[in-house]
Image: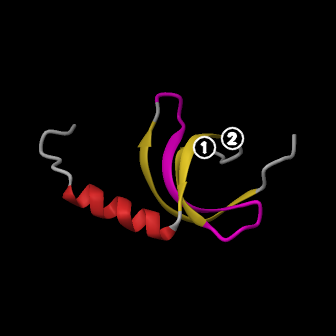
Amino acid sequence: MEEIKFEITESLGVISESAKGWFKELNMVSWNEYPAKVDIRDWSPDHTKMGKGITLTKSEAKKLRELLNAMPLDDVE
C-alpha cells in the first residue's frame, strides 16, 4: 500500500482533547502534495499519527459555516 504524504500547512485551532491525549484539530492540510484543504481530525500530540477525519474544500467549509451559524446551539453541551 502506498504511503500517504501530508503536511499541516496551517494550524487553525484545537477543538477538543481526548482522554488519551489526542487532539481534535482544525487545520489546513496538504495531502500527497496537492493544495491544502480544510481538515478536521484527531491527531496524536506529535502529529505522527492521525484518526479518521473529514477534509473539505474552502467552498464546502463556507457552506458548513453557514449551516453551523444557522443551527440553534442553546441546548447543545
Which quarter shows the C terminus?
top left
Q: Is 4 placed above or below 33 here?
A: above
The residue under the point 43% across, 63% down is: 61
x and y, in percent, of residue 28 in the image: 57, 64
Which quarter shows the N terminus?
top right
The residue under the point 46% across, 33% down is: 18
Q: On the image, numbered disc 1 is attached to which residue?
A: 45
Query: Does the magenta portion include 22?
Result: yes
x and y, in percent, of residue 41 in the image: 53, 46
Q: Secondary structure at mark 1?
A: loop
Q: Amino acid at mark 1?
A: Pro
x and y, in percent, of residue 22 in the image: 54, 37
Q: On the image, numbered disc 2 is attached to which residue?
A: 49
The residue under the point 41% across, 43% down is: 16
x and y, in percent, of residue 15 in the image: 41, 49
Q: Which residues are magenta?
A: 19-36
6 or 19, which is in the foreground? 6
Q: Amino acid at mark 2?
A: Lys
